Amino acid sequence: MRIAIGKALGGIAIALALASCSGPDAPDTEWPLHGFDERAQRFVGLDQINSDNVERLGLAFYHDLGTDRGQEATPIMVDGVLYLASAYNVVQAVDATSGELLWEYDPQVRAASARGCCGPVSRGVAVQDGKVFLGALDGRLIALDAQDGTPLWEVQTIDQSDPLAENYTITGAPRVVGDLVLIGNGGAEFGARGFVTAYRAASGEQAWRFYTVPGQPGVPDNAASDSAMEMAQETWAGEWWKYGGGGTAWDAIEYDPDLGLVYIGVGNGSPWNHQMRSAGEGDNLFLSSIVAVDAKTGEYRWHFQTTPADAWDYTATQNIILADLEIEGAMRKVLMQAPKNGFFYVLDRETGEFISGEAFVNVTWATGLDPETGRPIEVPSARYYRTGEPSFQFPSSGGGHNWPPMAFSPDTGLVYIPAQDVGMPFASAEEEQVIGAYTSGVAMDGGGAMTEEEREALYAGMKGYLIAWNPVTQQEAWRVNELAPFNGGVLATGGGLVFAGNTAKELAAYDDTTGAKLWSFDAQTAVSAPPITYAIDGVQYIAVLSGWGGGWPLTGGVMALQAGKAVGPNRLLVFALDGDQALPPFTPPEAPQRAIVSARPADEAAIARGNQLYARYCLRCHGTGVVSAGAYPDLRASGMVTGDAFAAVVLNGALASNGMPGFEDKLTPRQLEDIRSFIQARSFEDLAQP
């Protein structure tokens, strides 16, 4: 029997664990923080829904979100209300037992929605003391009244006088730490310098800021990170500051109230290519690192770098879990992370000391980790900019684990990871750093340069898994083979269950000790967002946002079709035992049938140039191989490509209000024609009638 534990958090009484919610007198259990509580384990002790009765789980109600892009947010449930952040940062408050819409707030960010690498997504809001905190795509942090959605204050977190200002976005969820609200940002591929800022929750006044990479030498930031930046600067070379340096903290920020530490997961460099970014020299702190800072002052305490001198977009922004584990006979306060680079890390969260780490997916860029320091033991060929030769390696820039959060069950001692094996060729690109344009320094194409046989071979090697991992022994306990990679976040419960979504359009429940699939629900669209659970009036609920899109077209595109067309209605889905509701019938959109040209363009050089330009400016929304895996238009079937409207939209921004920016300052008319040639070639290859 699990014991109910009550804890006051921000004036809201919540139940952190619940023995059973089988009776009307059982206390309610909320989901008040992004990872449920400060441990961010995404585990709740509720067991009304369990492995013996989960087959009775049914849809209690659903709510249409009214947006048509990817859904990645964790709902927050406080005082009987679910607070949702949909695509374009639209916030909705919904009754947690009926689905009734209570209020909606739209921050009007469509014009800024194409800034980022990965779609107009949001990973959620924070709620405390009657306020809902939202990080908007255009850089604003906004406080709303939790009762009616009225804006209370807002602050622009990005210095608008910074020449790099328009390259920033916010897609991560704010974190409440005491009387502060913390927010990071994204945008490294476009030229940005990462930082995390703490604001007073009551007023929006800035309390402190911590930069994650150094700025121009000799120019102090007058920030909490100043002393740390003096140390970090010694690990950089060249003139990185002109292009931001990267290191954006776009997701993981967690707080240990007992130690008074905030842990920041730091992202990739700008650009990825270490030679372009830092003359191929230095470890480039604090890229791809976990950094611990004082929660009250933001001052540096320690760091651990998972991928020194990162050259592959192996971010350490993936979710961080705090736990107390018995290791070699002693209890240790640890944090755990499975970042993109494919290794699972256990660190001492007081000191940052490396405890252990092993590969949890196929890793070919390194043979392992140094047992004393945790530094990767690299394969020489992985540094493609040094060898001058392409390096096909695992993981790809999409990572062995991306943003969908893993979960940890203290009942089983296992971590449940939405993992994948996807390879990628890395090679230096012959491109200049262009501020505001997607610049990785890595040769990428639109997926059209491969032959059909090469594409089939690449896709056949792509795998997706739900892996149960023992963090003490650093060994796999079990795995579930998914139909495709890029699956959803995870929830673990006291009922012996693990819930996770997938690209096969399911939310599924698994036995937490064996991985046996016990239940699934057809969501009519892929489920990327992580599920949550809560209890009200003796009833336990499971809730999740459904809707495909976001960053997966960048790493997906054609690849995302591996599990079938995954786009469908964007909804909040809520389940309970004996739920008897049903979704309305849905017919997936038909794939385009006809090519927009009757013959392949004859200029092969133009097609090749367009391939590279498409990859840089178009791929992140319209997909690899010009196959849209999300709600964006499939350009292979768009008549606009063949007419004058193409220039009006792509160069002049005729559809900027809908989130399609103009590229007149980045593309010449000749380059536009090259992109047109590549799209037409792909249209003919895929859709021309035999």
Image (tube, helix red, strand yellow):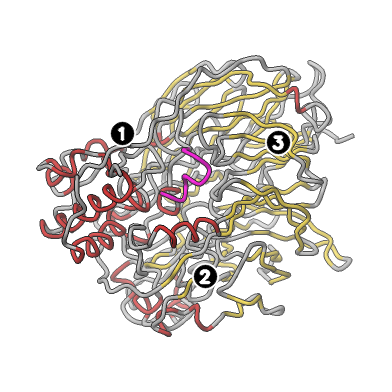
553 inside magenta stretch: no
Residue sitting at x 35%, y 69%: 443
Q: CA distance from mark 3 to mark 2?
A: 32 Å
For marks 1 and 3, the one nearer the N-term is 1
For marks 3 and 2, the one nearer the N-term is 2
Left-right relation of 218 to 257: left
Asked which secondary structure carries label 2, the reply is strand
Q: What residue is disc 2 on? A: 393
Left-right relation of 513 to 176: right
Amino acid tagged 2? Gln
Asked whether residue 42 is in view, the answer is yes
Percent position of residue 357, x then y: 69, 68
Contact, mark 1 vs mark 2 (Cβ under 8 Å):
no
Q: CA distance from mark 1 to mark 2?
A: 40 Å
Q: Quadrant of the C terminus?
A: top left
Residue sitting at x 45%, y 24%: 587
Percent position of residue 636, x then y: 28, 44
Foreground disc of the pair 1, 3? 3
Neighbourhood count class around disc 2 (C-alpha, 10 Å): few under 14, some 14–19, many 20 upward: many
Percent position of residue 583, x then y: 54, 19
Amino acid tagged 1? Gln
Q: Name the image quarter holding residue 79.
A: top right
Q: What residue is disc 1 on? A: 108
Magenta span covers which residues? 558-565
Amino acid tagged 3? Ala
Neighbourhood count class around disc 3 (C-alpha, 10 Å): few under 14, some 14–19, many 20 upward: many
Q: What residue is disc 3 on? A: 509
For marks 1 and 2, the one nearer the N-term is 1
Q: CA distance from mark 1 to mark 3?
A: 36 Å
